[in-house]
Amino acid sequence: MGDTPECPSPAGWEVEAESFKEQGNAYYAKKDYNEAYNYYTKAIDTCPNNASYYGNRAATLMMLGRFREALGDAQQSVRLDDSFVRGHLREGKCHLSLGNAMAASRCFQRVLELDHKNSQAQQELKNATTVLEYEKIAEVDFEKRDFRKVVFCMDRALEFAPACHRFKILKAECLALLGRYPEAQSVASDILRMDSTNADALYVRGLCLYYEDCIEKAVQFFVQALRMAPDHEKACLACRNAKALKAKKEDGNKAFKDGNYKLAYELYTEALGIDPNNIKTNAKLYCNRGTVNSKLRKLEEAIDDCTNAVKLDDTYIKAYLRRAQCYMDTEQYEDAVRDYEKVYQTEKTKEHKQLLKNAQVELKKSKRKDYYKILGVDKNASEDEIKKAYRKRALMHHPDRHSGASAEVQKEEEKKFKEVGEAFTILSDPKKKARYDSGQDLEEDGLNMGDFDANNIFKAFFGGPGGFSFEASGPGNFFFQFG
């Protein structure tokens, strides 16, 4: 900072300018950069052709983080004195801090032409090369949609180029594409505080809102970005997608409310094809389409849609509830319990607790013998229907009827005969049936089915010992004779 001033002004002015510079140096040493800036400005006003004054003010502006202004001063200093090494270094540092690594490299190479052993220029040249490499990697990774790696590259590049809006915007856009909206909003907002007309930052703010399913607000930011930069391709595409998505989703909702489920399905499907990056809106669209499929009784397709919804947004309670209901309807109770547990852990409401309890009961019931299925009757079967079913099944599987069959068949029919007797014992008794229907453990109620004798039930039903017999009337044919 002790360069000899070169000023055509009278000697008194030179002395005064030098005095201002010295006072500026003193404030700079105290890290009072605002006062240092004021005195360097006075020195320049007094003697505007001195390279070192511009160089010193550039250094001060750099310390204040005002790199764009600093760049102007550094460039002026080397225009006045092309051999001014510190001027070239500061110009290079400003270019690098602002993200222009190519221009920075030229400045550092000029320093090395003037002083080939300059270690600072050698290091800064390496830094500029590193930034260029990170830029190239990020460009390739963005095309590959490897947004995490782009964020990593931009973080590394910003260590050398802390004032580069371009790097910050690319990082913010990738954070938005990764669903890290608060971080992306923060970066964009910081830029807008410094430059409220920055179209890229306005676009990123809109993108965050768009991906958070605040589509109307998002469109406002995209429109504002396009006012600032009418040729902003990304803002234009995002604005078009946002409007199309909003319209298609609303049309689908209307069709659903009108009961036109086939049309609603088609509209939601079309909406899902608009923008694969809009995770939150697409999760809702999948859930909506799942609801449509459940109305159309396409339950497996409804389950698939809800699964896609929670893959996109694993906090989406409505999708878990819809899928759980479909699991219940298709008797996939273990899966239903798992979904209801997830819901209840997230939102501990009475309603969710009851849904979980119901699913657990159905799961427990599903693991027992299905006595209704064994008798071949509906769960709402009347007493007479249960008796008729027992008569039919008991006679069909009675061991005497299969006495001429193989040992394997006899064993299987004997097992079925016993199960039919068990089923009738429970379902023909209103109290036992009620306990069975509610999912209670029958053995806990003193009903040990292991000690059960199906023959006793059979005899009681058909009127006691000797009440009937099986007689063969030819191969494979039987008739019943009652006493």
Image (tube, rainbow, N blue to C red):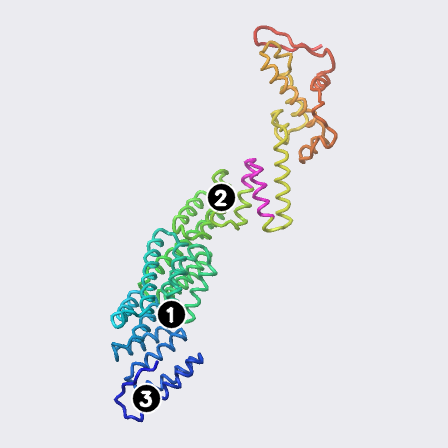
Picture coordinates of residue 373, whole percent (x, y):
60, 27
Residue at 36% across, 76% down: 59
Return the residue at label 1: 197
Figure quadrant of residue 117 = bottom left
Q: Please determine whether, in this image, residue 240 is positioned above or below residue 60.
A: above
The reply to whether dot 3 and dot 2 touch (C-beta < 8 Å) is no
Q: Is residue 204 left or right of residue 84?
A: right
Dot 3: few (<14), some (14–19), or many (≥20) neighbours within 10 Å? Answer: some
Q: CA distance from mark 3 to mark 2?
A: 73 Å
Q: In terms of secondary structure, where does tag 3 sit?
A: helix
The residue labelled by disc 3 is 46
In this view, the residue farthest toward the top is 474
Majority secondary structure in the magenta region = helix
Point 56% across, 37% down: residue? 329
Q: Quadrant of residue 206?
A: bottom left
Q: Quadrant of the N terminus?
A: bottom left
Alpha carbons under labels 1 and 3: distance apart: 36 Å
Identify the residue position indicated by label 2 in the image.
307
